[in-house]
Amino acid sequence: MGGTYAVIGDPIDHSLSPNIHSAAFRHLGMDCSYIAYRVLKGELADGVSALKKIAINGFNVTIPHKVEMMKLLDHLDETCSITGAVNTVSNSDGALTGYNTDMDGFLEPLERRGIDMDGTSVLLLGAGGAARAIVAGLAGKKTGSITVVNRTPEKAEELCMFAQRLGVESDVGRFGSSLKGYDMVVNSTSMGMNGEPSPVSFEDADRGLVVYDIVYKPMNTNLIKSAKSSGCTVVFGYEMLLGQAVRAFDIWHNKKAPHDAMKKALLGGF
Ligand code: NAP
């Protein structure tokens, strides 16, 4: 079965998605290709129309188009309508359906570890696009409460209200406050990409604290390093990246993605 797939965004040169999906095609002997296509801000409609002309089967959407792309869809999956952002699109004879696989991508590594989120308390750093998908994912897993900490407090307030609308208790916290009482800390800010120090300290963290950094480059951020040396369970950003790619594969090809082959390709890209 053949097919053409893509990822659109800007910048796009360093995207790991072509490696991950091409490895899956090779592993399963599928006659498909996956390309990275640079589409500048303000040129999304033209970019999407070019993809339709080549009868693209599906594509991923990344920065800066995840929200703007919503307007160009014919159908919205629930994951997309909840989060208000799209990262995966399938094309059926010119009709585009949008999905948000960041939600499942975030949850997958937790499920793989057998971590049950029911009734847990989460400290969430960041209130951007990824944080919104994380809140929606956690709400679906009956998380008890989410404290949101963000550099711009108004955005933390907004995300808090979003969590409450989804039925999760939520409040706004401050950087530097104690980790006592939390079951999981998630970093969804871009802090860590440029070697920033860990945004939290672990002195009074409870035993069994799960620390999830969605930043995937570098793989071992300072947050991950200090969480590891404090004996916490760590979840790496690359695992979420892999999880969202696996889910996109399932949607497009309607068959089980070769997780291990995709993981190997992803880790080889670092
Ligand atoms: P976004 O919508 O632009 O949000 C960025 C967030 O980071 C905001 O909360 C922003 O706070 C905060 N931030 C940025 N610079 C900061 C700084 N110097 N100090 C404190 N806070 C800062 O981006 P996003 O799409 O949510 O992505 C956030 C990060 O997650 C990126 O590093 C991205 O690569 C990563 N990500 C990973 C995956 C994965 O699969 N692993 C998926 C999606 C995203 P303000 O609101 O104050 O600006």
Image (cartoon, rainbow, N blue to C red):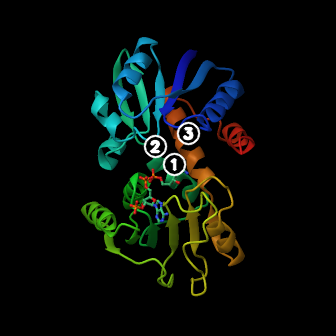
Mark 2 touches mark 1? (CB < 8 Å): yes
Quadrant housing residue 205: bottom right
Question: Is residue 86 found left or right of 167 in the rendered image?
Answer: right
Q: Secondary structure at mark 1?
A: helix
Q: Which residue is mark 3?
A: 245
Q: Position of residue 101 (x, y in %)?
A: 46, 43
Left or right, 26 with respect to 173, comes to right
Give me the C-alpha separation between circle 3 and circle 1.
8 Å
**Quarter holding the C terminus?**
top right
Nearest the eye: 189 or 112:
189
- Compared to residue 204, the image places residue 87 above or below, namely above
Q: Position of residue 157 (x, y in %)?
A: 29, 68
Amino acid type, label 2 = Thr
Q: Are marks 3 and 1 in contact (CB under 8 Å)?
A: yes
Identified at 41% across, 42% down, the residue is 100
Q: Residues within 10 Å of mark 1 (few under 14, many from 20)?
A: many
| Mark earlier in primary sequence (3, 2) | 2
Q: Position of residue 4 (x, y in %)?
A: 54, 19
Say whether marks 3 and 2 touch (CB < 8 Å): yes
**Which numbered dot is residue 101?**
2
- Say if disc 1 is inside 8 Å of ligand 1: yes
List the residue tagged with mark 1: 105
What amino acid is found at the position of numbered circle 3 in the picture? Ala
* Circle 1: residue type: Gly
Q: Position of residue 234 (x, y in %)?
A: 63, 66
